[in-house]
Amino acid sequence: MWSTFLAKIDGQAADHQPQDKERPMAVSFATNIRPMFTDMDIAHMKNFGVLLDDFGFMRDPANAQKVLNAVSSGAMPPSNSGETSWSPDQVELFRNWITDGYQA
């Protein structure tokens, strides 16, 4: 009887183990980041030497941080551009791309 009781408790404990959260796939420049920049963003920022559509440029930590600062503060896109500011989810996705190591 005691062994039955212990087996039942052990079985319940196993059923209540925390589940490992599945880590989302790494954020990629080509799939996730580049599409968030509009053609207008790319053309406008190219005038300032900021190559939003160039992975080589964007994976430089200093460049990526400047872009992150601009989109997270609402400075980019400019309010007079007629484009919508990035949502908190878009900013977080960009931040995750940086944190995950600038995947192509």
Image: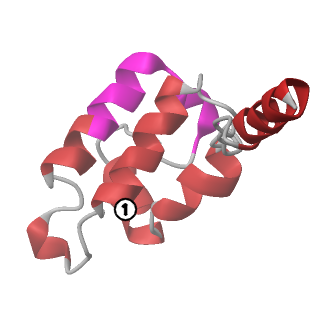
Front position in the image: 29 or 2: 2
Q: Is residue 15 left or right of residue 48?
A: right
Q: Is residue 66 magenta?
A: yes
- Residue placed farthest to the front in the image? 1
Q: Is residue 20 magenta?
A: no
Residue 51 spot, x, y in % from top left: 47, 42
Q: Is residue 62 left or right of residue 29?
A: left
Q: Is residue 26 above or below residue 76?
A: above
For label 1, the residue is 41
Quarter of the image for residue 59 reads: top right
Residue beneath the point at 10% across and 73% down: 80
Residue 76 spot, x, y in % from top left: 22, 55
Residue 55 spot, x, y in % from top left: 62, 36
Front position in the image: 28 or 83: 28
Residue beneath the point at 15% across and 62% down: 78
The stretch of residues the image draws in magenta is 54-68
Amino acid type, callout 1? Asp
